[in-house]
Image (tube, rainbow, N blue to C red):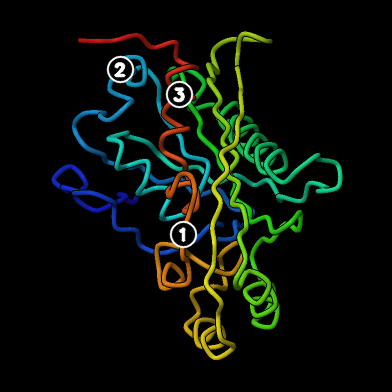
Amino acid sequence: RDLWPPRATSQVMVGRPRLADGGAKGVKRSGARAVHRTVARAQVHGMLHVARKKLESYSVVLASQSPRRKELLTSLGVTFETIVSRFDEDLDKSKFPDAADYAAETAFHKVADVAKMINEDADRVSKGRYLIIGSDTVVDLDGEVMEKPATEEHAFEMLSKLSGNTHRVHTGVAVCLLDPSKQGEARSFTTKCSETTSVTFSDLPESVIQAYIASGEPMDKAGSYGIQGAGGSMVSGITGCYYNVMGLPLNRLSKLLIEVLGAEEEG
């Protein structure tokens, strides 16, 4: 199994983690299953410190192959593996009251699919309990949901709309506690939530948009930009969680995990 990231046990991060690539949306998943084992820091820290003992009693799985989500989860000191969901992310957006609910439900389907994969794996059934984390991020401009651009022309259209305006970034987060050795309702529990951040763009000259698209950075990102890359230079301000725009709201995720695990202060 590949290690993610290399030599993470000796890695020291100061301040904001440096991310490999990516933006609000992850890399397109194929139908093939991908599994990687992450070697994280020696001890869970940050807000999750109060839940570290209970967290360590689970095998943690990230239902995503997004490099930035892997690095963000690693920054919390969590040891995990990744199993990429096969869910097509094709929910009917018109069925949801807003984009935040759409993102949360997509995250829910991702973890449900990975839970199904684990349940169907005979080698895993007797290997203890699993905690599966999934997320999905979308850009929302006045009710228009923007995901990854299909073409460079599509990217230009989205960035032109975002120029000089404030939009919202919604990340849905879902967590599943799974015990494959049990049967029926006792086997799993899944919950979901969402986090929203407002992002304001400066007025962007057409030449700036064209040059940014030519760099290739926008093409695999919701809304056609990545705040942690060159796209961050187009952002004049944000209200809310920065990491939410990157694809994994660390504060909201930590609170959800503490709530789900029922963790109390541990010495």
Q: Nearer the viewer, residue 58 or 152?
A: 152
Count all numbered tags in the image, as a single digit. 3
- According to the picture, the residue beneath numbered tag 1 turns out to be 237
- According to the picture, the residue beneath numbered tag 2 turns out to be 50
Q: Can you name the residue that lies furthest to the right here?
A: 94
Give coordinates of residue 61: x percent, y percent: 45, 34
Q: Which element type, helix, strand or loop, lies under badge 2?
A: helix
Label 3 to label 2: alpha-carbon separation: 10 Å
When the figure is inspected, residue 59 is found, relative to residue 75, above or below; the finding is: above
**Of marks 2 and 1, which one's residue comes earlier in the chain?**
2
Closer to the camera: disc 1 or disc 3? 1
Disc marking residue 215: none
- According to the picture, the residue beneath numbered tag 3 turns out to be 257
**Which of the 4 image quarters holds residue 195?**
top right
Q: Which element type, helix, strand or loop, lies under badge 1?
A: strand
Q: Which amino acid, by three-letter code, is at mark 3?
A: Leu
Q: Which element type, helix, strand or loop, lies under badge 3?
A: helix
* Circles 3, 2 touching at the beta carbon (< 8 Å): no
Give coordinates of residue 257: x percent, y percent: 45, 23
Q: Residues within 10 Å of mark 3 (few under 14, many from 20)?
A: many
